[in-house]
Image (tube, rainbow, N blue to C red):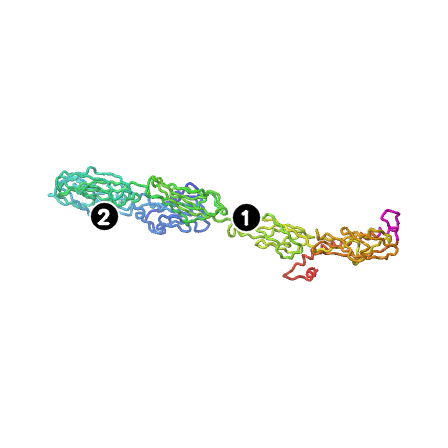
């Protein structure tokens, strides 16, 4: 019969107790209880699939086992009398742990059955009694043994009904019962010298079991006086660490007879156990009992020695006494620390473990008793763990924040100290390895990156590399990179740049400073944890100017590179012939222009290098030729320098009375100048529109000219050639 007990919580939700009761002699494979089901009722955290629980301690692995599904069964037929002998309680203990490090303590109490009958060590007992033994004289008898415990052990003795002898039952210090034969009437050897009876021992079962032995009594001739002890029972104490030959007690029996009739010999009774004889000895002449072997309180706390004193006269009646020796405990056993973890040298705990999470079980034992066996445990050092003690074991719990990136290993030292005088100590070391969790996002070395890139770069060239660090381990710390989706100039950012997993950023097109001077985009760094963590950084690309634009003449209006202007023949020195202007879309020195006259009638004209004003340097006179030619060059300051030129033909018109000062106005000249100005404005406007269209088409051509699989289109090739 399996008797389930009430389940209850102890101290904390991390530890629960389950109790079961079974009878001995159960068949192998008998189910004791469903630990998984019972633990779940108490809120115990069970793994989602077998094995639900892990056995970390089993006091009797031969007798019971826990299946992967959490069913507790017997492994073989359990004989309580072998496991626990006559102990009043027989309990098998198991400690199991879930994946979440919660602990379940299982107690299985084995109930005793009356499956053994009392048994005497021999099939007959022989006693000699002097015929002058007075009524009331007692003779201890060798008792019966019964491996059953409690009430199922030997409870009473009886003797075949008779008028001469009776039995008196006595209880020993260990709870066992013995019988003493009591003479009830005077004996007469001449009438009858031998008696035979049957002694029966009965246990307390229902029905009781009985064992019997034959008692043979021989009546011998009298010896006037018998030895007598001062006391019937002696009680002494002796320390467990007493050396050999330490005196335990000096027994004294007296006999008033003289000679051999008064000479007393001491001895242990025949049924004193070998264990007792190994521990003590008695001097047959003096009656002094001394230590004969090693006394160990943890093995035996009490010895009961039956001693008889017998004189050397004929037909002596021995005297008996009982010596109870109490072994006193000394603090001779240091505490023993046992780690009940799967790995007793190292345990692992996640850095995300919360306070109260159990990382290991500790069992501390001390064989001593009382204060000598009372042990206190503690963890040494300032560590984020604490020790919590229970009745039969202790747990090591997380008691602070763990961060593997700050500290990944702790060396814990458990110290156990008993309360003896002086106290004894023991230590046990345990390495706690903090395992990694993905609790750190990648961190860029800089929140902002900026790179200068010359325009007209080759598509596919590496611009820069970004880097992010992740202190986590393994996949949790493995970082990959990507471009955050976005637009640049209304175009997908991926048409401008790309990034490989290692963080190197490449151009996807040739940049044009005149079209895009700077652009920003974001780079995402993501680890490979589950779930993954990420962060981003901003990258700015600054496109630097290259002298890739040739100056374009915008004034005076050119036709096939030639402009014609007219000046009065009588124009004086310093007369402004025309103003040459050119545009250059480059910046800085690349776009700063200088004007010079390179060829032609340079002796008659000069030009301002900055503003391009062409002025006369002399008077022409009546004999001057009618046309003059000069070539004006506009040159930028880039490296290499680019230039544009204009061929200007200067016509000398008839004397129009042109003066630097204000004079009478010729209406025809004003009309001509007005018409020319309007034409010039229209021409400049057309030139500006043409240049603007040319600039816009250049960016489009650059983008379309990217290499495809290493080849250029014919248009790209021609553009590249240009």
Point out residue 232 in the picture as x, y percentages from the top left corner. 21, 38
- Residue with the most extreme top position: 230
**Element at badge 1?**
loop
Question: Disc number at residue 121?
Answer: 2
**Element at badge 2?**
loop
Q: Residues within 10 Å of mark 2 (few under 14, many from 20)?
A: few
Quarter of the image for the C terminus: give it: bottom right
Q: Dot 1 corresponds to which residue?
A: 441
Point out residue 436 in the picture as x, y percentages from the top left corner. 49, 49
Point out residue 187 in the picture as x, y percentages from the top left corner. 13, 41
Q: Is residue 52 in view? A: yes
Task: Tell me which residue sits at (63%, 61%) in the image.
Answer: 710
Q: Nearer the viewer, residue 545 or 274?
A: 545
Magenta span of residues: 655-675
Judge depth for marks 2 and 1 and give the one in front. 1
Q: Nearer the viewer, residue 272 or 209?
A: 272
Q: Residues within 10 Å of mark 1 (few under 14, many from 20)?
A: many
Q: Is residue 656 magenta?
A: yes
Task: Tell me which residue sits at (44%, 51%) in the image.
Answer: 50
Sequence-earlier tag: 2 or 1: 2
On screen, 636 above or below 86?
Answer: below
Label 2 and label 1: CA atoms lie apart by 79 Å
Point out residue 218 in the picture as x, y percentages from the top left corner. 15, 45
Q: Nearer the viewer, residue 613 or 669?
A: 613
Q: Are marks 2 and 1 in contact (CB under 8 Å)?
A: no
């Amino acid at each position: 019969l399996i008797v389930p007990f009430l389940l209850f919580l102890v101290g904390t939700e991390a530890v629960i107790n389950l109790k079961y009761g079974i009878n001995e002699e159960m068949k192998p494979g008998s189910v004791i209880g469903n630990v998984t089901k019972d633990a779940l009722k108490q809120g115990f955290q069970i793994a989602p699939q077998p094995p639900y629980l892990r056995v970390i301690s089993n006091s009797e692995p031969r007798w019971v086992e826990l299946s992967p599904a959490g069913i507790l069964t017997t492994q073989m037929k359990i004989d309580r009398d072998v496991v626990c002998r006559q102990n009043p309680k027989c309990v098998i203990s198991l400690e199991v742990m879930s994946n979440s490090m919660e602990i379940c303590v299982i107690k299985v109490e084995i109930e005793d059955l009356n499956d053994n009958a009392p048994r005497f060590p021999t099939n007959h007992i022989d006693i000699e009694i002097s015929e002058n033994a007075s009524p009331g004289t007692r003779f201890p008898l060798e008792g019966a043994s019964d491996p059953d415990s409690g009430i199922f052990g030997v409870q009473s003795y009886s003797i075949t009904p008779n008028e001469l002898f009776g039995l008196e039952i006595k209880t020993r210090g260990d709870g066992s019962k013995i019988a003493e034969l009591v003479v009830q009437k005077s004996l007469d050897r001449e009438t009858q010298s031998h008696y035979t009876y049957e002694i029966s021992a009965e246990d307390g079962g229902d029905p009781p079991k009985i064992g019997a032995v034959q008692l043979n009594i021989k009546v011998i001739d009298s010896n006037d006086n018998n030895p007598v002890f001062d006391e019937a029972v002696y009680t002494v104490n002796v320390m467990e660490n007493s050396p050999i030959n330490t005196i335990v007690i000096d027994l004294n029996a007296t006999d008033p007879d003289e000679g051999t009739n008064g000479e007393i010999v001491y001895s242990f009774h025949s049924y004193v156990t070998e264990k007792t004889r190994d521990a003590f000895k008695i001097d047959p002449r003096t009656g002094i009992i001394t230590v004969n072997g090693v006394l160990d309180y943890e093995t035996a706390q009490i010895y009961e020695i039956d001693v008889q004193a017998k004189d050397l006269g004929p037909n002596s009646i021995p005297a008996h006494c009982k010596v109870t020796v109490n072994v006193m405990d000394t603090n001779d056993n240091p505490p023993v620390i046992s780690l009940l973890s799967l790995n007793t040298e190292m345990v692992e705990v996640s850095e995300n473990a919360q306070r109260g999470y159990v990382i290991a079980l500790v069992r501390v034992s001390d064989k001593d008793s009382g204060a000598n066996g009372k042990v206190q445990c503690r963890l040494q050092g300032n560590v984020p763990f604490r020790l919590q003690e229970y009745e039969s074991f202790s747990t090591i719990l997380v008691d602070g924040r763990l961060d593997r990136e700050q500290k990944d290993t702790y060396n814990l030292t458990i110290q156990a100290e008993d309360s003896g005088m002086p106290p004894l100590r023991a230590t046990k070391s345990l390495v706690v390895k903090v395992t990694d969790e993905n609790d750190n996002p990648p961190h860029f070395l800089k929140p902002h990156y900026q790179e200068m890139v010359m325009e007209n770069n080759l598509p596919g060239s590496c611009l820069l590399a970004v880097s992010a660090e992740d202190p986590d381990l393994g996949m949790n710390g493995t970082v990959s990179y990507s471009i955050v989706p976005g637009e640049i100039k209304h175009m997908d950012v991926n048409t401008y740049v790309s990034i490989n997993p290692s963080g190197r950023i490449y151009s996807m097109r040739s940049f044009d400073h005149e079209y895009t001077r700077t652009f920003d985009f974001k780079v995402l760094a993501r680890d490979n944890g589950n779930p993954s963590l990420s962060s981003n950084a901003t990258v700015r690309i600054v496109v630097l100017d290259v002298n890739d634009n040739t100056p374009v003449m915008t004034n005076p209006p050119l036709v096939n590179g030639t402009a014609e202007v007219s000046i009065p023949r009588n124009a004086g020195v310093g007369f402004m012939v025309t103003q040459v202007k050119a545009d250059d879309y480059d910046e800085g020195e690349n776009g700063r222009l200088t004007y010079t006259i390179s060829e032609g009638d340079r002796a008659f004209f000069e030009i301002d290098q900055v503003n391009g004003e062409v002025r006369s340097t002399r008077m022409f006179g009546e004999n001057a030729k009618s046309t003059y030619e000069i070539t004006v060059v506009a040159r930028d300051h880039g490296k290499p320098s680019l230039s544009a030129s204009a061929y200007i033909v200067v016509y000398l018109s008839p004397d129009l009375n042109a003066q630097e000062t204000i004079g009478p106005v010729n209406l025809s000249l004003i009309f001509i100048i007005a018409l020319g100005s309007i034409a010039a404005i229209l021409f400049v406007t057309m030139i500006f529109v043409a240049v603007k269209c040319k600039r816009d088409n250049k960016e489009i051509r650059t983008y379309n000219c990217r290499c495809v699989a290493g080849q250029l289109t014919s248009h790209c090739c021609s553009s590249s050639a240009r």
